[in-house]
Structure formats: structure tokens, C-alpha cells
Image (spheres, grey):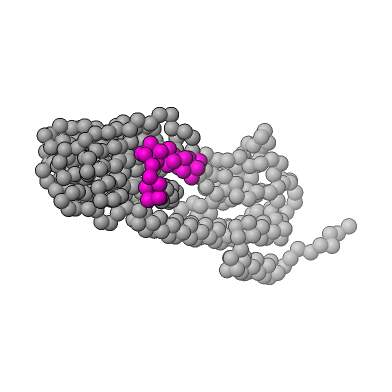
Amino acid sequence: MTDSRKKPSRKALNDFKLNALLEITHAINSDFDVDGLLGLYRVTLEGSLGIEKLILYCHQGKWQSMLHFGLNGAPPDIEDAGVFNATQNMGLSLSSTGEMMSFDIVIPINNNDVPIAFLLVGDVEENKRGTSPVIKHMKFIQTITNIVLVAIQNKRLAEENLRQVRISKELELAAEMQSMLVPDMLPKDDRYDVSAIYKPHLQVGGDYYDFIELDSNRVMFCMADVSGKGVSAAFLMANFQAYLMSFFNYLNLPLEEVVKLLNERVMKSAMGEKYITLFIGTFDRSTRVLEYINCGHNPPVLVHPAGGLDLLSMGTIGLGMFDELPHIQKGTMTLAENTLLICYTDGLVEQENVSEEEFGTPRLSQISKENQHLPAEEINVKILNAFNLFRGDVPYVDDTALLTCKFY
């Protein structure tokens, strides 16, 4: 009894391969997704060429299967590509869940002479007659695999580029939004001399400062730092500023109540995932009384005209850490004329030099004391120059904000 099925002629086989390549190319140009391309690739190899067993390994953090068929179990992940390199064209056996998987051929798939995948192919029945389709069609298999994988790689690169463009636009928006949070004009007259410097560590930082005249005698000033950076930190700080402004513009509340309300809003907005450290104070020029609350922030440096120093640390914990603040202590003091106040964020004092030494609050205090006679802007320049000289070539470790206030 003879087999009625005829083997395809060489011309028919060549026509099939050409059509298969055209179909794959059309699918790529039609923007098939990854699953669609892999499905078409599998139909070509398994359904049309008779490939019985296959694993396509690609590197995605580690070497793992992108496609497989004809196996008794799941293919194992591979730690080192040396497993493939040592066995190309010599066969390979893998063990997974107790099953041994044997493959006749290991085909490297390269892009710009760099291996992007390894294709393991074999027959299920090792003793059947005739030339294995793996051997017969190996060149075509390698060609079509290379085309499909390069297309998938390009597709993923294009998707990553689009993702980066979206992120970049989001960061631009957040940076623009953040630039609107900090004041572009600070008072400099016979009552107050205020100057600020802000250097974000990344494109979008999480620091915020302000100095607001509430009426002819009273001012409010603050320095805040949100945990974490980027877009989410900028949005949280934007919400925080809106709440802060509304409390002072529409409510006449003591500082303790303002801080309690801010804690509630931060907790609601961040849901415990972020927190904000804050130094907030008010100064009444008619009485020269300074009131402040430090919510877990770096203590500002207060330089008295005679040269004495105070670190303003009285207050409570950071905002958004607990539903309710466990305790609040308000600091109160009377300021003499020409008192200097330096508010800052941790990016300034925690910056290290090449010897891993921090810039530190004592160094900041000494520079402030030595230059207290200068205008606020010049004091900031002195501090920033000393800061940059100290860090040398060491990059910024965090956002750096500095708010210098002189109360005449």
C-alpha cells in the first residue's frame, strides 16, 4: 500500500516560503501586536513546516521562553546564555519539573552581531524516517525568526520611546506647575529682605517655600519638603499649597489649628504613601513676635543681631504620617531688629563631599553668622558658593531649597 500524499515540489516549497515571508512582512507593516506576530510565526513553523517541538528564548531580565510548543512541561528559565553558546548546532537537553527536554538544534538569533534570542528546535519522534524538517528548513527558520524578533524588538523600542515621550511631557507639565507654586517676587524693603534659591535634584522636585504678607503687619512664611520626587510629589505639593493658602486667606486660625487641618488634607490626599515635613511661622511686625511650628522639618537657623544662634525645632511630626498629630508645640519668641532667619531643606545639609562628610547644620550656621550683615540675596550666594565648593564634583543628592529672611 502506497502513501497517496505527495511531497511538495521544490518550487511549491519555495513559493510557500516566499508567501510566508510576505505574510509576516504584511503583518509587521499592519502593526500586528506581539501576540499576533508570534501566532503567525507559530502557524508557519508548526502547521506548515512540521516543526514538532520548539522553545524561543529571549532575554527579558533573564533568559525566558517567549514561545514554546510540543513539550510535556513548561520550559525552564535560563540564568546564563553560555548554556546556549556552548551547544549551538550540537543539541541541548534541559530539565524542567522532572522532565528532560531534548532538542536537535540551537539557533542563535542576532541583531547587529548581538544575540537577542536563541531558538531550540527538535522532533518529537526521534526515529521516524526521512530528513527532519528542522534540518531541511533550518536556514528559513533562522531567517523568519530573525525577521519576527527584530520586528518585536523594534515594536517594543517604539512603545518605550512613546512611553518616555509621555513621561517627558508629564514632567514638563509638573515642572511648569511646580514653578507656579514658589513665589517669583519676594519682599525687599525697609521691613523685610527675603531671598530664595531652589535647585531641583530631578526635573521635578518636591520642595516648596513661600513668604506671604497677610496684612500690613503680619507675614506668613514656610518651607516644606514632600517625601519622594517626580510628578506625584509635585501634585501633592500643589494640593498642599492650595490648602495652605485657603486656610490663611479665608480662616483666621491659630497655627496649631492650621497644622491639624493640613495634616488631615495630606493624609487624605496621600493616603499614607507620602508625607510632608513643614516649617511654618508667622511674624507680627507691630509686636515683633514670631510664632512657629516645625513639623518634622530641618530646624531653621535664627541668627540674633548680637551673634547668638537658635535652631527652631519645636513642633510636631511630619504631616501625613498619622491620622492625628500626637502632640503640637508652638514656639514663640520676640525678635530684635535685624534678626536673620535661614530656612532650608535636607538637600542642603545632607549633601556629602568626596570624603562622605555632610555639609551639615553647624557649617550652615557658621556661614550665616559670619555674613548676617549682608543683604539676604548675598547671604544666599555665600551659602551656595560654600555648598558647591564643599561638594566638589559630587552630584546633588536631593532637592536643595534655601529661604533667607531678614526682619528689620
Decide if residue 392 is on the left or right side of residue 42.
left
Q: Is residue 264 magenta?
A: yes
Decide if residue 199 is on the left or right side of residue 244.
left
Q: Is residue 130 above or below residue 287?
A: below
Q: Is residue 124 magenta?
A: no
Q: Is residue 347 above or below residue 109?
A: above
Give the quarter of the image for residue 346: top left
Q: Residue at (57%, 48%) from the top-left corner?
A: 57
Q: Residue at (60%, 46%) from the top-left corner?
A: 65
> Magenta segment range?
245-271
x%, y% of residue 18?
63, 69
Instruction: State the count of labels.
Output: 0
Q: Nearer the viewer, residue 377 or 139?
A: 377
For the question of whether residue 137 can be seen, the reply is no
Q: Residue at (64%, 37%) from the top-left corner?
A: 96
From the image, which quarter does the N terminus lie in?
bottom right
Q: Nearer the viewer, residue 379 or 126?
A: 379
Q: Residue at (74%, 65%) from the top-left corner?
A: 8
